[in-house]
Amino acid sequence: MDLATLRARAPLFLAVFIDIFSFGLMYPLIVALFGGGWVAETYAPATRDALLSLAFALFPIGMFFGASLLGDLSDALGRRRTLMLCMGGLAAGYALRWAALEIGHLWLFFLGRLACGLMAGTAPIAQASVVDAAPEDQRSAAMAQVVLVNTLGMVAGPAIGGVLGHWDFRLPLGLALALCLVTLAL
């Protein structure tokens, strides 16, 4: 892949990375958040366990409904606009979760988690965009690049979330928010 192609696909790759990265980033934080601190002090163990399950489930539930909607939206509005909408929605979801940690409001955290799930449909949109732009003989290589970026995000999310969250729960959220804003600027 030449430099011009890489430069053209960089926003797509970054969007795909952030999408799957955001999925895994929160797992170590959610476990730590519900295992101690203000959540453990506020809720009884049975309630806390139910809320923990909800925290894990909201992203995939949002993704279930959002992915098909975003696919249709990308056909109607265009791939670039839909990817920008996804990045804006992910940024808003991270901002909501940051605010939830600042003020100690769990339902705001849940709303941010659901919002990120609803906006997590960039991989299929990016794949469609790559297929649209790549010459036929290069489509399989382009798709493999999208899958590679997806895999890197899947591995990096929990690792970075765990390391940064060890120091402060807001650090991984801030990093993800910054990545979303950088992608929007590209």
Image (cartoon, grey):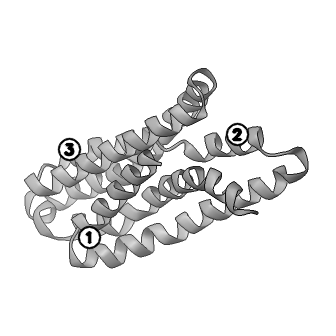
In this figure, which residue is indicated by the disc labeled 3?
108
Q: Nearer the viewer, residue 104 or 20?
A: 20
Q: Which mark is residue 128?
A: 2
Tag 1 or tag 3, which sits nearer the N-term? 1
Percent coordinates x, y for residue 159 in the rendering: 43, 75
Percent coordinates x, y for residue 120 in the rendering: 49, 44
Q: Please, what secondary structure does the residue beneath circle 1 have?
A: helix
The residue mark sitting in front, 1 or 2, is 2
Q: Please, what secondary structure does the residue beneath circle 2 have?
A: helix
Q: Where on the picture, by quarter, is residue 4?
A: bottom right
Percent coordinates x, y for residue 40 in the rendering: 15, 64
Q: CB atoms at circles 3 and 1 under 8 Å apart? A: no
Dividing the image into 4 quarters, which one contains the N terminus?
bottom right
Distance, label 3 to label 1, CA atoms, is 17 Å
Is 24 left or right of 163, judged from the image as shown? right
Graded by Cα atoms within 10 Å as few (under 14), some (14 to 19) or many (20 or more), the crowding at tag 1 reads some
In this figure, which residue is indicated by the disc labeled 1?
32
* Residue type, label 1: Ala
Distance, label 1 to label 2, CA atoms, is 37 Å
- Residue, x 31% and y 66% (percent of image)? 172
* Residue type, label 3: Leu
- Residue, x 35% and y 75% (percent of image)? 162
* 89 is higher (above) or lower (below) than 157: above
Farthest top residue in view: 76
Is 92 left or right of 132, judged from the image as shown? left
* Residue type, label 2: Ala
